[in-house]
Image (tube, rainbow, N blue to C red):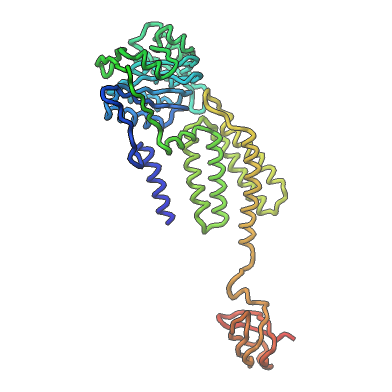
């Protein structure tokens, strides 16, 4: 049963990550003669899920002969590898991809700058920003001089390649976003030609795109967006859940639940619910840690906290180890998530960390304490539990006979072989040999 549930869960996650529908989807068909536009929404840092989502959207747009695809973008950036994969997918698309930085207040930060330039056309909503594309390390640290120079040079070359159809000022600005971490507003980007349009919403963008010519796979193509039907193409439920793992608060809770559940399972083996929940939570937390800028040194303090909790249970609840464990847990969480800071990535909530630390300490000490005390209790069943109990003689013990003990008849042997014990006398069990009880008379 456990194996079946695990296989079903893995199948569900894998199926959804591949973007395959779990049930046939009903698609709204546009009226005859009206062009169809597919609208994708990319929110948050770049993730493998987002890459597969964009690729899947382009495949659907191609199958449905869509006029174009709009990628509505709001991202602080992400890894260079993921950025390059998205750029390759967009530039290799047979369907025009329009990158639209929206809604108001959105940004195309860091890697999002080059993704915007990769679109066959690009637009920004008012009050949005683009730029700050200088490379940094996975934990937000400055790169060494040689490595930084190499990364910047290749990114500048990529920017020049993507912006080569644009004015010289736009190319210079694109390079400055990498070399000097420069960022500009939508109006500033439009002024130099870094983007093609400023559009207040999707309808305004479609209006401006009507009759606009883009180059797709080296072939000019004029867009016809008048009276176009826009259809939203959303993430699957599992993709949406995995996208939430870019939130450090959720990853922190998953990590906490996972570690606690695994330790509870180890302290009281035999069940499977705690172990299964712990394994799933830890797997999701590890996935999230791979997406977020984190300082893994904090994990040492979190693990140390649980070790201190276990020692507290074993040595007898003095309180000092619990306080040390809570402090270690809080320090570990803050070091893990808040000691590394990249623009656009949320910080973990300090009240959440403190509250979780207290709840974890109390619940862990309670649950594990009960489990350990239960292991130390004397047996509650079996022949060993009969020692010390009293019964009534039903067949004279001379020295072997029968006694009634707790509603059952037992073969018993008197320890004093010279003095028979008559029927009705009380006896006490002093030992067990196989299925025979050793007894003595109670005076």
* Residue at (52, 59) in percent of width and height: 270
Query: Does 38 sit left or right of 405 as displayed?
Result: left
Asked if residue 107 is positioned above or below residue 286 in the image, the reply reads above
Asked if residue 347 is positioned above or below residue 307 in the image, the reply reads above
Q: Quadrant of the C terminus?
A: bottom right
Q: Quadrant of the N terminus?
A: bottom left
- Judged from this view, the residue extending furthest toward the left is 219
Asked if residue 164 is positioned above or below residue 249 in the image, the reply reads above
Answer whether residue 92 is visible to the viewer in this image. Answer: no
Asked if residue 396 is positioned above or below residue 20 in the image, the reply reads below
Report the label total: 0
In the image, 56 versus 297, the foreground residue is 56
* Residue at (46, 24) in percent of width and height: 75
Answer whether residue 269 is visible to the viewer in this image. Answer: yes
Which percent across, then down, holds residue 259? 55, 45
In the image, 204 versus 4, the foreground residue is 204
Query: Does 397 sit left or right of 209 as displayed?
Result: right
* Residue at (35, 39) in percent of width and height: 21
Which percent across, then down, holds residue 292? 50, 31
Which percent across, then down, holds residue 311? 65, 50
Location of residue 38 (image quadrant): top left
Query: Does 136 sit left or right of 312 as displayed?
Result: left
- Judged from this view, the residue extending furthest toward the front is 31
In the image, 378 versus 433, the foreground residue is 378
* Residue at (49, 25) in percent of width and height: 137
């Amino acid at each position: 049963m456990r194996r079946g549930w695990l296989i079903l869960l893995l199948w569900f996650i894998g199926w959804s990550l591949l973007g395959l529908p779990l049930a046939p989807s009903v698609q709204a068909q546009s009226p005859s003669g009206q062009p169809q536009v597919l609208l994708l929404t990319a929110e948050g840092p770049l993730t493998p899920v987002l890459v597969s989502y964009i690729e899947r959207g382009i495949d659907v747009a191609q199958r449905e002969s869509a006029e174009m695809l709009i990628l509505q973008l709001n991202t602080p950036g992400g890894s260079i590898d993921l950025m390059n994969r998205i750029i390759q997918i967009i530039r290799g698309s047979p369907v025009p991809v329009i990158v639209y930085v929206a809604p108001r207040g959105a940004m195309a930060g860091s890697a999002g700058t080059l993704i915007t330039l990769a679109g066959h056309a690009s637009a920004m909503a008012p009050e949005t920003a683009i730029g700050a594309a200088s490379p940094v390390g996975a934990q937000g640290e400055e790169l060494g001089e040689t490595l930084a120079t190499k990364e910047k040079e290749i990114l500048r070359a990529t920017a020049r390649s993507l912006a080569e159809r644009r004015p010289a000022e736009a190319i210079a600005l694109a390079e400055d976003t990498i070399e000097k971490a420069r960022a500009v507003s939508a109006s500033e980007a439009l002024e130099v030609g870094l983007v093609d349009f400023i559009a207040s919403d999707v309808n305004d963008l479609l209006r401006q795109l009507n009759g606009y010519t883009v180059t797709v796979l080296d072939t000019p193509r004029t867009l016809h967006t008048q009276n176009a039907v826009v259809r939203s193409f959303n993430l699957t439920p599992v993709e949406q859940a995995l996208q939430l793992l870019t939130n450090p608060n959720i990853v922190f809770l998953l990590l906490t639940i996972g570690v606690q559940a695994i330790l509870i399972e180890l302290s009281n083996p035999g069940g499977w619910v705690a172990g299964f929940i712990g394994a799933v939570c830890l797997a999701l937390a590890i996935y999230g840690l791979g997406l977020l800028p984190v300082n893994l040194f904090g994990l040492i303090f979190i693990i140390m906290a649980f070790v201190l909790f276990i020692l507290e249970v074993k040595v007898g609840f003095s309180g000092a180890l619990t306080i040390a464990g809570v402090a270690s847990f809080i320090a570990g969480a803050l070091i893990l998530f808040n000691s590394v800071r990249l623009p656009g990535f949320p910080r973990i909530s300090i009240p959440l960390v403190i509250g979780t630390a207290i709840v974890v300490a109390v619940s862990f000490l309670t649950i594990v304490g009960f489990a350990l005390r239960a292991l130390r209790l004397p047996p509650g069943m079996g022949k060993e539990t009969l020692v010390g109990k009293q019964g009534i003689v039903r067949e004279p013990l001379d020295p072997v006979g029968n006694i009634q003990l707790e509603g059952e008849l037992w073969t018993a042997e008197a320890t004093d072989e010279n003095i028979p014990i008559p029927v009705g006398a009380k006896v006490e069990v002093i030992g067990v040999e196989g299925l025979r009880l050793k007894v003595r008379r109670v005076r």
